[in-house]
Amino acid sequence: MIIDQAMAAEVHSEQGPGFARINAFADPSVGEAMRDDVIALVRASDGRVAEVDGALVLPEGQADFRAKAPEDRISKVFRLHRRPVFADFIRSPEVVDVLRNDLGPDVDCFLSQFIFKNPGAWGQPWHQDSFYFHFEPRRPIVGLWLAITEATLQNGCLHVLPGSQREPIHEHVPDARPGANYGYVEIVDHDMTGSTPVLMDPGDLLVFDSHLMHRSTDNLSDGYRGAMVFHFCLPVVGTEPDNVVNDRVPLLRGGELVPADPYN
Ligand SMILES: O=C(O)CCC(=O)C(=O)O
């Protein structure tokens, strides 16, 4: 696995595409353990909006999901990175290597979400993640998208617009579909010609800049498409507005892991 300054340049420089993929980054069993942990939370929530053990469970907004079993009607589960299976992953030497190269010696994890894209679920429209982030410094911020299942054209993989990390944050309008999920917004003032799908196998990782324009499409298959997404930034400067899905945890200081106490 090559994790070096060249990869960081792919993700954040003006010349790069704004993302890099690392095939077979994690063993697929890592993602399966994440999925099992999240399913236990979802069952405890009975598939409703709920705070369970510090995590936030959000169901699909689409009406046709209402009668389904708990994990079949969930859209996303947030605030997972203090839980052991997720904390172990972001504290692993491989992830630390990516983060040190990408962001430097001082890094916080501020966001984590497990995405269930169940059969029939709508994709997330074109957006830039930094639209949602309101703290300083605004950049660099990096997302790690770990494939839990295969991500295919049929089950709603990500699509990215190479080079769009050079763009400022565009206007995002509310997703107009009735029953669209919590927080879904859309960029409508930019030409997405040249976008490319990101087909993944379980354990593959996409590393991407928070200004990169991306979306995912609807799940037209009969199986779920799972992904685990973490976001990392530099230590905050000044005050940070409250945000129900964020949970800032210091991860690296001076290039070394912060002792695990802040996770509890
Ligand atoms: O995986 C998906 O369906 C969408 C994820 C996404 O766009 C994001 O995490 O910003």
Image: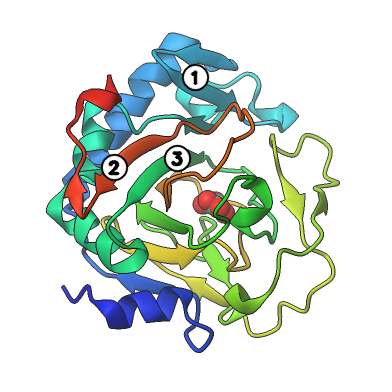
Sequence-first disc among 2 and 3? 3
**Image x and y of residue 262, in percent:** 28, 26
Q: Look at label 1 and name its amino acid.
A: Pro
**Front position among marks 1 and 3:** 3
Q: Which residue is mark 2?
A: 251
- Work out which quarter of the rendered image holds the N terminus and state it: bottom left
Indicate yes or no: mark 2 CB to ligand 1 under 8 Å.
Answer: no
Residue 110 got which mark? Answer: 3
- Cα gap from disc 1 to disc 2, whole angstroms: 32 Å
**Front position among marks 1 and 2:** 2
Sequence-first disc among 1 and 2? 1
Q: Residue at x 57, y 40 (%)?
A: 238
Sequence-first disc among 1 and 3? 1
Q: Secondary structure at mark 1?
A: helix
Residue most extreme to the front:
238
Residue 82 got which mark? Answer: none
Q: Residue at x 77, y 56 (%)?
A: 186
Residue 70 got which mark? Answer: 1
Vertical arrangement, residue 38 with respect to residue 231, above or below: above
Is residue 236 visible in the rendered structure shown here? Answer: yes
**Image x and y of residue 194, in percent:** 64, 85
Indicate yes or no: mark 3 CB to ligand 1 under 8 Å.
Answer: no
Give neighbour class at mark 3: few <14, some 14-19, many 20+ (Cα, 10 Å): many
- Work out which quarter of the rendered image holds the C terminus and state it: top left
Identify the coloring: rainbow
Q: Residue at x 69, y 61 (%)?
A: 126
- Cα gap from disc 1 to disc 3, whole angstroms: 27 Å
Q: Secondary structure at mark 3?
A: strand
**Image x and y of residue 46, in percent:** 50, 11
